[in-house]
Image (tube, helix red, strand yellow):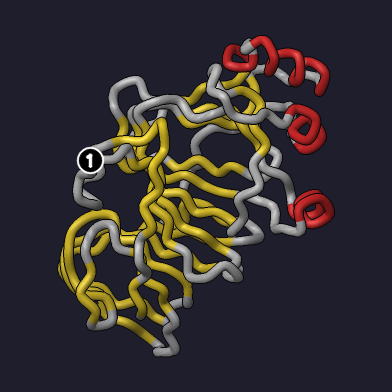
Amino acid sequence: MRRLEPSFREKIWGSHRLAPWFPNSDQKIGEVWFQESADHPLLIKFIFTTEKLSVQVHPEDEYARAHHSSRGKTEMWHILAAEPGAKIAAGFREPISREQLKEASTTGEIERLLAWHEARPGDTFFIPAGTVHAIGPGLALCEIQQNSDVTFRLYDYGRARELHLEAAAEVSRTTRHPGACSPTGEVLAACDYFVTRRIEVENLRKIENPESGFIVVLRGNGEIAGARVSPGEVWQWENEARSVEIRGEMTFLHISSL
């Protein structure tokens, strides 16, 4: 296994409080990136919010390749901590037209049209490309995404950043979103790009035929395949053994890329 180095990104909506995953910071850190390489299909982030993020949407692969020579961006969020009343937006309360989408984005009404879902620790939200979404304040979450930074902003609460209404309207799904996922055993989310499992270990566990991918340590301490791991660490796993032993008391995400 190889431990990836974190890259801390300051954001106007970020937080000084990053514990227990990272040391608290004098800067407002919004994102902590773990990127194996620019060519790897997946990117893993921790996100910390004290203000609302912009209302935005990401394109699918075909549009992103044609217009930005990039992958699209399908992602998922696993909620790590949430202040009372913290919410995320995904999809719309009722289906709307693309013209309504653009008009509501210019007036700010889009906030009211979005479906806001309460976010609790342990919840997972799957956000396929084309889903109009936003993250509210008071949250810490882990994001698993296609390795792409193509983002079209629809509404930004008066911040002086560019909006991309025409492109956003082209790629947006203007329908409802199902809300938080219902896990299937340990599997939190599965799609054409990744499968994410949440694994709880108490003392000792053996995994047979483990898949290569990434390990994101969320809670506790212990050893995985003989490597000492701690919360906030992301490890790249390239395991060819028939089985691996995990020792300690911890919770981690195992992400395999497809």
Name above or below for residue 83 compared with residue 63: above
Nearer to us in this view, 194 or 36: 36
The x and y percentages for residue 214 are 43, 68
Relative placement, left or right, of 248 versus 216 is: left
Task: List x then y, in percent, for residue 64.
Answer: 76, 51
Indicate the quadrant where residue 95 lies. Answer: top right
* Whether residue 245 is situated above or below residue 36 in the rendered picture: below
The amino acid at mark 1 is: Asp
- Asked whether 99 or 186 is in front, the reply is 99
Residue 212 pos. (x, y %): 47, 77
Quadrant of the frame with the C terminus: bottom right
Compared with 11, 169 (above or below) is above
Quadrant where the N terminus is found in the figure = bottom left
Residue sitting farthest toward the front: 160
Residue 22 drawn at (x, y percent) = 24, 52
Q: Is residue 185 visible?
A: no
Q: Disc 1 designates what residue?
A: 26
**Residue under the point 32% across and 43% down:** 80
Circle 1: element type: loop
The quarter of the picture where residue 19 lies is top left
Count residues near mark 1 (Cα–Cα under 10 Å), then give few for <14, some for 14-19, many for 20+.
few
**In this rendering, does residue 115 appear at all?**
yes
